[in-house]
């Protein structure tokens, strides 16, 4: 889709403008969207809310512009490119999460201010999480034991890791 303002670049910012009972949908490229940020002003909004909205939109637009230039690569399994991901922000296969990881994390961080879930979790998850933490600790101990050439300790730690993984609680 082409930007309706400049008519040259691909549109990657989509928004709806509601005036009365009319709903107008707009498609803009990043640079044109950056130009209209000051236009998104309402006389009823307080200065702090207006500044917060402008800052938020600026962060999102700059993140999109940065990822446009980045071009993280192509998935070797489904052949999805970064441009495909920008046009349709749905991933083609599970491997795309690894291929586009830095971009996805950046977008999530700018939208949600975090990439970690904070909130309630089911009890079954908490037990699995405890086992996952234990597994990570064992793996670090294993690396340390191997680097210090304590192979008997490493074998015992390896057995503990295998036991946790057999229980099926090692993976979140």
Image (cartoon, rainbow, N blue to C red):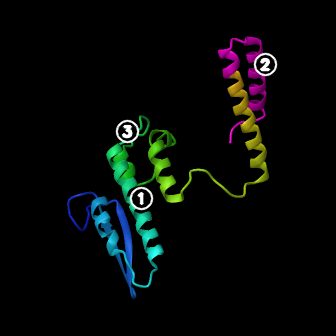
User: Is residue 161 shown in magenta?
Assistant: yes
Taking the spot 46% from the left edge, 79% from the top edge, the residue there is: 46
Mark 2 and mark 3: Cα distance apart in space: 41 Å
User: Measured from the top left, where is residue 113 in percent x and y?
Assistant: 54, 56
Which disc number belongs to residue 156?
A: 2
Q: In front: mark 2 or mark 3?
A: 2
- Sooner in the amino-acid sequence: mark 2 or mark 3: 3
CA neighbours of label 2 inside 10 A, class few (<14), some (14 to 19), many (20+)? few
Q: Which residues are magenta?
A: 143-172
Taking the spot 48% from the left edge, 56% from the top edge, the residue there is: 110
**Residue 81 appears anywhere in the view:** yes
- Sooner in the amino-acid sequence: mark 1 or mark 2: 1
Prevailing secondary structure class for the magenta stretch in the rendered image: helix
Q: Which residue is mark 3?
A: 73
Res 8 → quadrant = bottom left
Which disc number belongs to residue 59?
A: 1
Residue lying at the far front of the rendered structure: 47
User: Is residue 11 shown in magenta?
Assistant: no
Which secondary structure lies at badge 3?
loop
In this picture, is 105 found above or below 119? above
Drawn side of residue 20 relative to residue 117, left or right:
left
In this picture, is 20 found above or below 9? below
Number of numbered discs present?
3
Mark 1 and mark 3: Cα distance apart in space: 23 Å
User: Measured from the top left, where is residue 105 in percent x and y?
Assistant: 50, 48
């Amino acid at each position: 889709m082409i930007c309706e303002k400049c008519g040259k670049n691909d549109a990657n910012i989509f928004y709806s403008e509601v005036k009365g009972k009319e709903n107008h949908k707009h498609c803009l490229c990043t640079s044109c969207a950056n130009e209209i940020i000051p236009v998104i002003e309402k006389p009823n909004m307080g200065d702090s809310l207006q500044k917060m909205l402008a800052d938020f939109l600026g962060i999102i637009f700059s993140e999109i512009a940065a990822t446009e230039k980045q071009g993280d690569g192509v998935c070797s399994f489904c052949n999805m490119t970064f441009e495909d991901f920008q046009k349709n922000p749905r991933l083609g296969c599970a491997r795309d999460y690894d291929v586009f990881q830095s971009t996805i994390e950046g977008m999530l961080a700018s939208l949600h201010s975090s990439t970690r879930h904070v909130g309630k979790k089911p009890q079954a998850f908490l037990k699995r999480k405890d086992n996952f933490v234990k597994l990570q600790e064992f793996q670090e101990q294993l690396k340390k034991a191997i680097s210090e050439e304590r192979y008997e300790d490493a074998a015992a730690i390896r057995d503990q890791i295998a036991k946790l993984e057999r229980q099926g609680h090692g993976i979140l």
